[in-house]
Image (tube, rainbow, N blue to C red):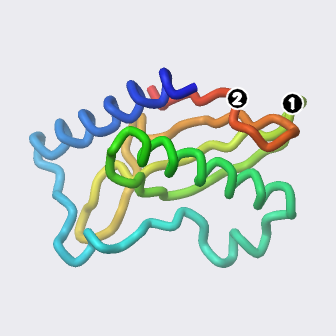
Amino acid sequence: MTRWFVPTAALLIAAGCISERVGETTVPAEAKGLWAVGVSPEQAAGLAGDAAKAVLVARAYLEQQAKNANAPQPQFLGFDPSPSHSGWDVRVQFVGVWRNGEPTPGPGYFAMLQIDRQWKVVRVRGGA
């Protein structure tokens, strides 16, 4: 699993660097300490128990992979869990760029995590 995550993370980091060169705004100083949670209180309240657990498993997995790769923690914009035949699929949207101090999505800044019924991440597919 890690053999797919590291190239995906490197691609996301490289794409972020490229987008800065083409005129996108950089992260404002006051926003660098902020953590894009990715789930609003309204969304969190609407998640059923297993959907919430799938989001927590996906987030913990991605945070641990970043830590293992000695990379910065990912900034999440959103999580979209959906049940599948083998467990859960969780689509994770990452911050693509910062515009006017607000995090916004960018093309390819997402990943799809497949989580089995034992709450283990079995596959990670990066954005394209």
Q: Does residue 111 sit above or below 24 in this rendering?
A: above
Q: Residues within 10 Å of mark 1 (few under 14, many from 20)?
A: few
Residue 53 drawn above or below residue 62? below
Q: Nearer the viewer, mark 1 or mark 2?
A: 2
Question: Residue 116's x, y, as percent?
Answer: 81, 35
Residue beneath the point at 73% across and 49% down: 81
Is the N terminus in the top left, top right, bottom left or bottom right quadrant?
top right
Dot 2 lies on which element? strand
Residue in the image at 38% along x and 35% along y? 9
Please name the amino acid that badge 1 sits on.
Answer: Ser
The type of residue carrying mark 2 is: Val
Q: Residue at x 15, y 46 (%)?
A: 20
110 or 107, which lies in front?
A: 110
> Which residue position is annotated with label 1?
86
Percent across and percent down for residue 128 are 44, 26
The relative height of residue 3 versus residue 47 in the rendered view (above or below) is: above
**Residue named by callout 2:** 122
Q: Which mark is residue 19?
A: none
